[in-house]
Each structure stands twice: as structure tokens, then as C-alpha cells.
Image (cartoon, rainbow, N blue to C red):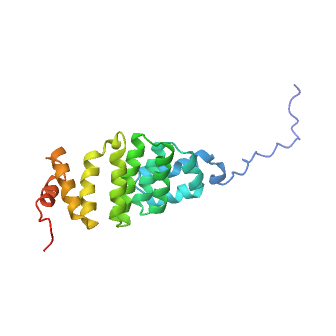
């Protein structure tokens, strides 16, 4: 190797290549996972917005049941009944007859009851949940919410009958006091 030529100029220092904006460098999977992170942090509005940013419909169409339930929960808690319905109905369609389908039916009943105040629809979804082989492990809660929905739907005779059934199955359950009050009401309003 010949010695360096003292008259030669040194090469200019290397400058780093310009960086692409962070969004462009973030892999698509990271965008798809953003809604999960936000939902776990209780940032439900932002979680739904993040899911919409990556494409809500394609996300729902390809997600496993656990993700659909989590996305439905985030949407329900954000007050987005439309998006929650999409996620839960996808579970009902693709995973029919599973524990997850029962959980989705219970969640749809909660939307009908809590967000839409459609107590008849809540009763239908609770009946659907209770008709599932496993009922998603929510039998006691579904029967209790059914009592409330029947009463609010203006169906007192059915509510009293359901109260008797609830007490026979769950005499110490969380809805037991409420069920006893329904069961002892007069059959005809004054």
C-alpha cells in the first residue's frame, strides 16, 4: 500500500441518509396492533379510530374471535354501537356454537339495553345467549339482565315468571333481591 498523499483532500464526512417519516417506516402490522394497545389502555374512542384507520371491515373480516370480542368491547365502551355490532355479529357468524358466540350475544344484549334502550331486543339477545351450549359462562348474569329487560319492556308477567326461575337457580345471585321484589309484585297493576 502506498502511503497517503499529503496533498490529497480528505473525503467529506458521510451524512446519514434522510429518514422516512415514522409512519412510512412503521410496518403495517404495527398499525393493526395500535387499536389493541389503545383498547388495553382504556382509550376506547382512539382504539376504534385506529381500527378504522387500518380498515375496520377488513380487520373484522380476518380477525380471530378474541380480537373481535376485544374490538367489540372497545367500540361498545366508546358508545359506537354500530362498530360493536359489526364485531360481535362477525363472532356470531364465523364462530357459531362456541363460547365466544355466547359472549357476543350477551354483549349485543348489553348494547340493546344500555345504548339503545331497546329492551325487547335485549331480551331476544339474552335468550340467544342462554340458548348457546355454553352460554359463554354468563348464564347467571344473562338471566339477571333478562329480568331487568323484561320489566323495562313492560312485560310484567314474563318478568315475574323469569324471577321465579332465577331464584330457583341462583337464590343468592346478584339479582336475587331484585328477583324477589319482582316475584312478589301483584299480578295486575292497580
In the rendering, at what x and y percent does residue 39 appear? 44, 52
In the drawing, does residue 105 fall left or right of residue 34? left
- Residue at 32 percent across and 47 percent down: it is 130
In the rendering, at what x and y percent does residue 38 appear? 46, 53
- Residue at 14 percent across and 65 percent down: it is 187
Q: Say if residue 47 shows up in the picture.
A: no
Residue situated furthest bottom in the rendering: 190
Kindly indicate the quadrant of the structure image that contains residue 120.
Answer: bottom left
In this figure, what is the number of numbered marks? 0
- Residue at 56 percent across and 55 percent down: it is 56
Q: Say if residue 21 shows up in the picture.
A: yes
Residue nearest the observer in this picture, 168 or 144: 168
In the drawing, does residue 75 fall left or right of residue 153? right
Q: In this view, does 26 lie above or below 190?
A: above
Quadrant into which the C terminus falls: bottom left
Residue nearest the observer in this picture, 4 or 108: 108
Residue nearest the observer in this picture, 98 or 114: 98
Residue nearest the observer in this picture, 87 or 123: 123
In the rendering, at what x and y percent does residue 74 appear? 43, 55
Q: In this view, does 101 lie above or below 112?
A: above
- Residue at 86 percent across and 29 percent down: it is 3
Residue situated furthest top in the rendering: 1
Quadrant into which the N terminus falls: top right
In the rendering, at what x and y percent does residue 112 appear? 37, 62
Amino acid at each position: 500500500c502506498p502511503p497517503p498523499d499529503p496533498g490529497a483532500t480528505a473525503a467529506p464526512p458521510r451524512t446519514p441518509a434522510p429518514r422516512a417519516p415514522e409512519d412510512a417506516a412503521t410496518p403495517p402490522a404495527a398499525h393493526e396492533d395500535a387499536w389493541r394497545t389503545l383498547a388495553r389502555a382504556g382509550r376506547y374512542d382512539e382504539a376504534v379510530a385506529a381500527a378504522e384507520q387500518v380498515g375496520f371491515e377488513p380487520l373484522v373480516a380476518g380477525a380471530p374471535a378474541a380480537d373481535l370480542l376485544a374490538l367489540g368491547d372497545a367500540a361498545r365502551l366508546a358508545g359506537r354501537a354500530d362498530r360493536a355490532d359489526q364485531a360481535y355479529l362477525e363472532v356470531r357468524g364465523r364462530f357459531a356454537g362456541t363460547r365466544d358466540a355466547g359472549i357476543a350475544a350477551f354483549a349485543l344484549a348489553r348494547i340493546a339495553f344500555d345504548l339503545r334502550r331497546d329492551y325487547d331486543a335485549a331480551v331476544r339477545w339474552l335468550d340467544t345467549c342462554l340458548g348457546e351450549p355454553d352460554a359463554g359462562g354468563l348464564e347467571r348474569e344473562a338471566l339477571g339482565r333478562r329480568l331487568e329487560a323484561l320489566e323495562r319492556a313492560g312485560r310484567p308477567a314474563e318478568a315475574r315468571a323469569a324471577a321465579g326461575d332465577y331464584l330457583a337457580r341462583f337464590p343468592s345471585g346478584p339479582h336475587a333481591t331484585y328477583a324477589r321484589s319482582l316475584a312478589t309484585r301483584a299480578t295486575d297493576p292497580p
